[in-house]
Image: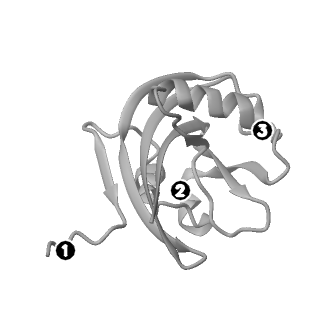
């Protein structure tokens, strides 16, 4: 099993949300990436946004967490995504250019998030409401069965 500890950002503008995906893939994600050992989640998120798309970001409030699991090459993958509100000077009228050849960034209307295969799936309702929750969000795609 592989475990991923990830920071992701809600980057919104005018009823739109910024998403990212690997080119050729059908799954989309909120922008962000892995938290390195000894690095805080907000620092990791700002670093990932800068590295992946030269986005100057002010990482704001912690919104919540979403856990997820999937199989890759027959191996179980599990992740915890720490979600933050992010302020930028970006506009949904502008194209966000990726610095990494395997990634593409694009804006989608929040109310159409169901059509964009966002993962973890638990984030879809959070994005669709296009506002921050009153309390920290917890989303899961993992079975909560106890043995």
Quarter occupied by the N terminus: bottom left
Q: CA distance from mark 2 to mark 3?
A: 17 Å
Residue 70 locus on image (x, y percent) = 48, 71
Residue 132 locus on image (x, y percent) = 38, 37
What residue is shown with label 2? 111
- Name the secondary structure under disc 3: loop
**Residue at coordinates 76% horizontally, 35% vertically from top-left?**
53
What residue is shown with label 3? 93
Left or right of residue 73, residue 54 in this image: right
Q: CA distance from mark 3 to mark 1?
A: 44 Å
Q: Between residue 110 and residue 58, name the one nearer to us.
A: 58
Q: Between residue 95 and residue 130, name the one nearer to us.
A: 95
**Residue at coordinates 61% horizontally, 37% vertically from top-left?**
14
What residue is shown with label 1? 145
Left or right of residue 16, residue 134 in this image: left
Quarter occupied by the C terminus: bottom left
Q: Quadrant of residue 33?
A: top right
Marker disc for residue 29? none
Q: Residue furthest left?
A: 147
Q: Between residue 101 and residue 106, name the one nearer to us.
A: 101
Q: Nearer the viewer, mark 3 or mark 1?
A: 1
């Amino acid at each position: 099993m592989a475990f991923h500890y990830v920071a992701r950002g809600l980057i919104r503008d005018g009823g739109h949300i910024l998403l990212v995906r690997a080119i050729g893939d059908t799954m989309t994600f909120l922008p962000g990436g892995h938290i390195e050992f000894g690095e805080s989640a907000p620092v990791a998120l700002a670093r990932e946004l800068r590295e992946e798309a030269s986005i100057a970001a002010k990482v704001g409030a912690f919104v919540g967490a979403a856990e997820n699991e999937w199989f890759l090459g027959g191996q179980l993958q599990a992740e915890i995504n720490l979600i933050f509100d992010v302020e930028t000077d970006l506009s949904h009228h502008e194209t966000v250019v990726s610095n990494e050849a395997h990634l593409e960034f694009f804006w989608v209307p929040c109310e159409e998030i169901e059509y964009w295969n966002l993962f973890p799936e638990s984030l879809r309702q959070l994005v669709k409401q296009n506002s921050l929750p009153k309390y920290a969000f917890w989303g899961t795609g993992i079975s909560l069965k106890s043995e």
